[in-house]
Image (tube, rainbow, N blue to C red):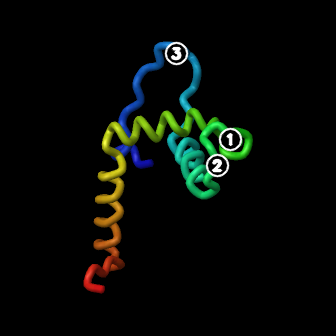
Amino acid sequence: MASLLSPAPERRRRYPGRLRVPDRVALAGVLYLLRTGIAWRDVPAETVGCSGVTAWRRLREWTEAGVWPRLHAALLAELRRADLLDLDD
């Protein structure tokens, strides 16, 4: 996700030295779940790059931060700019 769309990560309190999973990896976990329809706990971390719990938490963070409406608006603006959006049909 573009840094303008995703919220700044909060400082970890519980495991401050652990590296945060990149947003792209967490998004891959969310998309994997949506494509396959499996449960969060069944997301294969070795295939996706993060656990289903991590993907779920990041999805929750993004939802609470209002990322999805901003992403939708950015995609529509990009399609309009490229003259690929036709709402007349």
17 relative position to 74: left or right: right
Return the mark for residue 1. Answer: none
Instruction: Please state which of residues 79 and 35 is positioned toward the viewer in this rendering.
Output: 35
Query: Residue 38 location in percent, x, y?
Result: 64, 49
Within 10 Å of disc 2 (Cα), the crowding (few <14, some 14-19, many 20+) is few
What's the distance in space between the residues labelled 2 and 1, CA to CA? 6 Å
Instruction: Please state which of residues 38 and 79 is positioned toward the viewer in this rendering.
Output: 38
Element type at marker 3?
Answer: loop
Within 10 Å of disc 3 (Cα), the crowding (few <14, some 14-19, many 20+) is few
Mark 3 vs mark 1, foreground winner is: 1
Residue at coordinates 66% horizontally, 45% vertically from top-left? 48
The amino acid type of the residue labelled 1 equals Asp
The image quadrant of residue 46 is: top right
Q: Residue furthest left?
A: 88
Dot 3 or dot 2: first in sequence order is 3
Return the mark for residue 38. Answer: 2
